[in-house]
Amino acid sequence: MLIEEIKLSELQSIYLLDKDNLPNCAAIYFVSDSSQVLYIGRTLNLVKRWKDHHRFKQLKRFNRKDRISISWMVCTNDINTLLHLENELIKLYKPPLNWSKVVSPIRKITPLETALQQSLQQLAKFNTMIFGFDAVAEEEPLTIYLMYPVYGRRGVSGGIRSVLRSINKKASSLKWKEYQTNPKSLGKLGYWETIYNGIRIDLTPFDGLVHFMDNSTHRTIAGVEFMAFSQEQLEVLLENIPEKEEISSLEALEDDPIPVKLVDNYQPQEGKHINVVDVEPWEELEPMPEGEARVMTRQFLDVDGVEVEVCTNANGKYFVRHNVYWWIMRGQKNPNPQNYNLIINFQNAVDRLSSIKWSGYRFRFETIMFSEDDVEVESVLLPLVMFEDLVKNDVSSFLYKVLEEIQTGEYKPKPEDSLHLKLYAWLQRNSLSSRLQSENN
């Protein structure tokens, strides 16, 4: 019998807390909650194995929220056969507790659908597009092809790698595999894949993807919205590919192939969030005539111990001065413009963003006068939303463990944490623009 033909729902099972009633037999056993297989093991004596199972205390905690059961398949007592079968079943079901050490403090199991949606939501933020859907499968699984943009040599590959590795660290059955990585000389671009309920999701880099974004349509995967190639775009692109045999069945995605309800774990609790105010799309300021100063007001926000000076012009648009950015991100006050090549540094930082919104923005030094105290300073102005994007994009100095705590909402700022880390964590759930609107109102 093929392992794919094993139907867990038809196996004998027992409630976790009734484990003493398990039979005395050699078996492969499955520990499951209402939605997924949590653990798979093998034993020559099932009841004896569960008298003092190393996972029991951990499973007992999970049982408080979701009823857990033990089901089993009676097998031969040949240890090599049991070992082989156990390994094959673990590869098939990917039970989260088999991927973690007992000593690891697992606080919760992330359902398969939740882990999938969380990873897709993060990918959508990097301007990932749906390329197409291969719905014709013989031996290979049905495949959804996603592509992420390449800006310059590396683009957003590092950010995507960080996000997917964080997802892989969760106690979940969903795992992303980096099946190919370009050499460092070519940008170390990553190629990823995962499988959900027999559907493969393939993620690859695409140099020039930005040229298809303006005319793209929108489609959903597992309830998460992406930009997507239209059928017309796909046909034009495929015409220029010499060898079409392997992709002859590729079509533009129409209906969601994974129709599950979208679960937003990051929705703030009612009564505990700042009212969100829509911010107008950015319009770049015209340069001031030579010899004139740009008149602005300023106010200071305290965000988890980080002081952010925000400037406002006469049209009500918000900015952050370059020295504030430099202090928060690099811990240096009043950087010398020539020594630090500020204009080039800001241009390079914007080019690394996953969004093309700020591409071509003109950074320039200009004289700013604060009307309330008649002070003049020379500065480079960063639009407030750009400042937020830059803070959220640069995570290279953070440890993966801290990033995971931030993603799950478990991070608590500590006095020794950098200003950048504190502000980065706060911005995962909030917006400086909305905070300003709320305070001003």
Image (cartoon, helix red, strand yellow):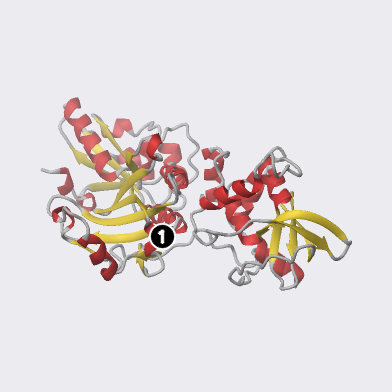
Could one spot residue 254 in this view of the protein? no
Question: Picture quarter containing residue 288?
Answer: bottom right
**Residue 393, x across and y down, in percent:** 55, 50
Q: Mark 1 points at which residue?
A: 210
**Residue 169, x across and y down, in percent:** 44, 41
- Name the side, left or right, on which 401 lies relative to 6: right
Above or below residue 248? Residue 16 is above
> What count of labels does the image hold?
1
Front in this rendered view, residue 48 or 38: 38
The residue positioned farthest toward the right in the image shown: 373
- Who's the residue at 57% across and 49% down the image? 349
Could one spot residue 136 in this view of the protein? yes
- Name the side, left or right, on which 65 lies relative to 373: left
- Who's the residue at 73% across and 49% down the image? 323
The residue positioned farthest toward the front in the image shown: 290
- Who's the residue at 35% across and 48% down the image? 174
- Name the side, left or right, on which 244 lies relative to 56: left
Identity of the amino acid at label 1? Val
**Residue 112, x across and y down, in percent:** 37, 52
Quadrant where the image shows the C terminus: bottom right
Quadrant where the image shows the N terminus: top left
Question: Picture quarter containing residue 170?
Answer: top left
Residue density around tag 1, few if under 14, some if 14–19, many if 20 or more, within 10 Å: some
